[in-house]
Amino acid sequence: MPLPTIIIGAGVGGLTTGALLSHDGHEVVVLEKSANLGGRTASMKFKNHVLDNGFHIMPFYKKSAIFTILKNLGIESRLKLAKVDDIAFYATTGFHIYPKGMVDLLRLSLIPFKSRVRLLKLLLPLAFSSIEKTELWDDVPLTKITNDLDADTNAFFEAVCMLAFADTADHISLGEFARTIIRANPFKGGTSEFAYPDGGGYDSICHVLGDFISENDGIVKTKQLVKKIIVKDSKVTGVVVSDSLNSEKIIPTNSVVVSYPAYTALNQLFEKNVIDTKFVEKIDKLNKTTSVVEVHFALNSQIDTRQVVFPVGKDYVTKGIFFISNITPSVSPVGEHLIIAGTPVSSADTEDSEKVKNIVTKMKEEISSIYPKFDSALLWERPMAWKLVESVVKEPGKVWKSKMPHRIPGIEGLFFVGDSTISYGIGTDSAAHSSILCHPKIKSFLNSLIG
């Protein structure tokens, strides 16, 4: 008979997997080392504002992997969502509307008409490709098709990559970019809509999932550090857990789901030689991260009615300005407004306080140049330098099926989910898609134990 499945990590990957298994009637125990649910989406209260751990957004809205799971569980109505659809570019020529579909590209005032036509010719074949065909482009950099474009069109690509991948075009695989375009194509059942929890805090998603697990007799426990996964005779037999009092205990189990970056887990959770060294070395190559500097700003007045603005052009350090209070006023106290601005940086920059300070100063200067009322409206600022945003598995050669597999051959009862495992997309949507792909494998294994 199967023992309760242990899920390590209460982020989107772990909780979507736990919710799907609970829905099937399987016993699950989710163990989270921190005090809160959410993983990398965890939010916090600061001066009565809800601050996210970076800026998160649900891509493809009702077509997203997360929404699909909530719908399959019958709990999609529990998560109230606000649409994010008032998006614009800002260039030296002023504000330009962000295109919501292929036809909108012809009205894209950011670039000259001839460039719009060329851009449309470039994107249409991608938008009508198959997912299978995009796999052939997974080792090809996106810049292979953008290098010869004019500066304005390249600026458009950079803005799209910031919205879809939180990164620059030179870090993106053509295959991953093409899959994003396909998923946004309404003629193939896709959507370019985005959403954010109406109550504020992207971790609202995780709380909805955690509640569902508890309602279905599952257990979700915080402040539980899993120190080791026990494997005997090529089978999972238990986990070693340390609680907030540093008290260790062994929890017996037939099955474990690891829901944080696989390269970290493989190096931390197993006795030596349990996992083949060459396999670990291969997965270690996925250990590349996106680093960013982001700043939350609280204002005493609204400086723009838009929801997202992307400054474009090489002269701008600031790559995205997100008006969170314009998406949902729930994140701020009455009379105040919350925005977050961000830019990708090198990992070394995040460790250099002087560089971070200079970047923040430059970002403030740029926002002031776009919005003259910014300085007088500013109440406070809270800079953050993130060395780890997500696994950069969107790079050429590190996407889709080149990621960590959900199972390691030869070990029974061990599964991996999350954005570092086989899935498309990035971040939370990728983590949820990974759960969708892995769920049948876990279910089949557990049913075989019942036998």
Image (tube, rainbow, N blue to C red):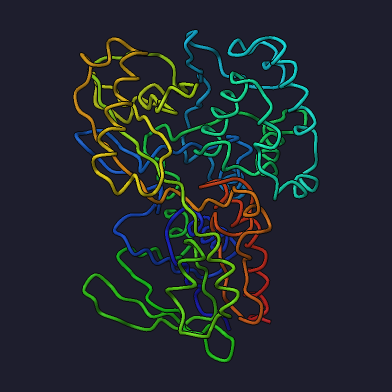
On screen, 404 above or below 84? below
On screen, 405 above or below 96? below
- What residue is rendered at 52% in x and 85% in y? 273
* x and y percentages locating residue 225 in the rendered image: 34, 70
The quarter in which the C terminus is drawn is bottom right
Q: Residue furthest front?
A: 148
* x and y percentages locating residue 12 in the rendered image: 48, 52
Q: In the depicted view, which residue is nearer to us: 86 or 93?
A: 93
- What residue is rendered at 29% in x and 41% in y? 384
Q: How many marks?
A: 0
The quarter in which the N terminus is drawn is bottom right
Q: In the depicted view, which residue is nearer to us: 62 or 343?
A: 343
| 109 left or right, relative to 224 | right
Q: In the depicted view, which residue is nearer to us: 331 or 386?
A: 386
On screen, 329 above or below 167? above
- What residue is rendered at 54% in x and 39% in y? 165
Q: Residue furthest bottom?
A: 233
* x and y percentages locating residue 240 in the rendered image: 38, 80
| 235 left or right, relative to 359 | right
* x and y percentages locating residue 295 in the rendered image: 31, 33
